[in-house]
Image (spheres, rainbow, N blue to C red):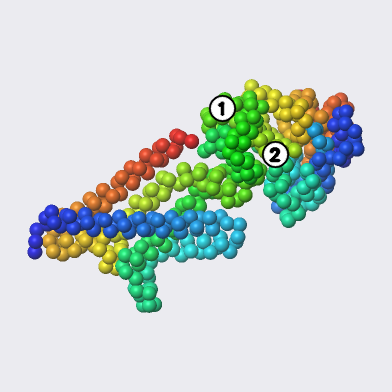
Amino acid sequence: MSRAEAVLPAEGQPIDQVPIVRVTGLEKSFGPLKVLDGVSFAVQPGQMVAVVGRSGSGKSTMLRCLNGLEDIQGGTIEICGHQVGRPGSWNKAQLRSDVGMVFQSYNLFPHLTVERNITLALTLVQKKPKADARRIALAVLEQVGLAEKAQAYPEQLSGGQQQRVAIARSLALSPQVMLFDEVTSALDPELTVEVLKVMEDLSRGGMTMILVTHEMGFARRVAHSVIFMHRGRVWESGPTAELFARPQTIEFQQFVGSVL
Amino acid sequence: MTQFNSFHLLYLVDAAKWTILLSLIAFAGGAVLGMALALSRLSQWRALRWLAIGYIQIVQGTPLLILLFLAYFGLGILGAKLEPVVAAGLALTLYTGAFLGEIWRGCIQSVPRTQWEASDCLGLDRLQQYVWVILPQATRIAIPPTVGFMVQVVKNTSLASIIGFIELARAGQIVNNSTFQPFLVFVCVGAIYFALCYPLSVTSRYLERKLHVAR
């Protein structure tokens, strides 16, 4: 665990930059089952961090904690200046405007058109006029290559298209950090590619992203740094190239060997 | 004693208007009460949840007939002497609300939890989540069982005859008393109930099919 607690510098960025996400000693239990056992890491602005590990290692739970979807039993989470997790210590509405999240199962609203899926929060939460919301929706749909689907309903789209809409929906709110929870796990390989392409473009544009993923090839190629989780802990982490070139722990070596 | 004739039939049809009125009262009142109960059952406040559960358990475990007696004779003795139509409307509202509350709670809960999470992550507050995301989806699920229950309510209005309210069933008794042709009279009464309920059943089945294949 030599590099486990290290602050992860983005390649080419100074290490003393203030991290936008900082997690220290995060603990989370479901009843007697301890899922996260002292997770610590930090993410610099503009970084893409891939969180990898076997099923049950706590990756998704950790991501959900970051967005306040789970209450936590110990440690601290600071994300975009919000102290998340402890009841009463953070303002959910403010956190929501800074952190976007995309899920494995897309979770689009099936009764609304693609455009309305995107404008809903813009008009209700950000109180934007309809015309502005519409313009933003079309812009983000353009960005994910689905401008022509604005009036379609989610069920009329392929899984990959639905997931791109979900990304656009989150993107429309101009978050500072985006969380991706196994967003390609429900997709066929050929549909996975189009979603990963959108994410790669986002990262190029400077978006800070934390993604839980099983796409090791993608993580290795695109992520600035990688966190390997094992038994509810950050077992090993560091800049991507270095980590894959010289794995420090036997667990990570085995994991890489089993998935690549 | 007179023979059953077109005058009697018109009298029955006229009484059916009161059956329809009573059904509408029960349904409108029951819908408001039922929605309040469904949302209370799902509230974050424990006291509100238990209050709703208690009400639903008690009313569902009480015969409608007893509710009618309580609303008419019971309140009468307590000093609130209600018109039969008001007492019947009240009892049916309390009864309908309890059942619709449970039906609708189930429908709201059958909207996937992930829809709550996704709308939460977009920053919608609880009221906005209900209005814009959850209830529109729950409504689709709710229409068939709700219409199905409406059929029950229409038939159950016949119990109001017991407190002297002249609706279709009571009118049938009156006509029978003067003609003493029970088979003919009550077949007519039954036919009118059927004419009221059948369109609802057909609508329910139609909606079930339609909503099953549609979004």
In percent of the image, x 86 and y 35: which residue is there? A8
Q: Mark 2 lies on which chain?
A: A
Residue name at image x 53 percent, y 30 percent: A152
Image check: B20 left or right of A199?
A: left
Q: Quadrant of residue A253?
A: top right
Which of A232 and A124 lies nearest the eye of the viewer?
Answer: A124
User: Could you say where residue A125 lies in the image, as x and y percent from the top left?
Assistant: 63, 45
Q: Nearer the viewer, residue A139 or B80?
A: A139
Q: What residue is rendered at 62% in x and 36% in y?
A: A132
Left-right relation of B160 to A144: left
Direction from residue B89 to residue B120 in the image, left or right: right
N-term mark: 2 or 1: 2
Q: Can residue A95 be seen in this view?
A: yes
Kindly indicate whether the residue at mark 1 contacts the one at mark 2 (C-beta within 8 angstroms): no
- Amino acid found under the numbered disc labelled 2: Gly
Q: Is residue A174 above or below residue B94?
A: above
Q: How far across and down, in percent of the image, does residue A244 sit?
A: 84, 27
Image quarter hosting the C terminus of chain A: top right
Please name the residue that numbered disc 1 is placed on. A149
The count of marks equals: 2
Q: Name the residue under label 2.
A: A100
Quick one: A210 or A113, which is closer to the camera? A113
* Residue A151 x, y percent position in the rendering: 53, 30
Question: What residue appears at the point 40 percent right and 61 percent down from the top-left corner?
Answer: B93
Please provide percent x and percent y for residue A176.
75, 38
Q: In this view, does B181 lie above or below B125?
A: below
Instruction: Tell me the element at label 2.
Output: strand
Disc 1 marks which amino acid? Lys
- Kindly tell me whether residue A42 is visible in this rendering: no
Q: Residue A130's quadrant in the figure?
A: top right
Q: How crowded is mark 1: few (under 14 residues within 10 Å), some or many (20 or more)?
A: some
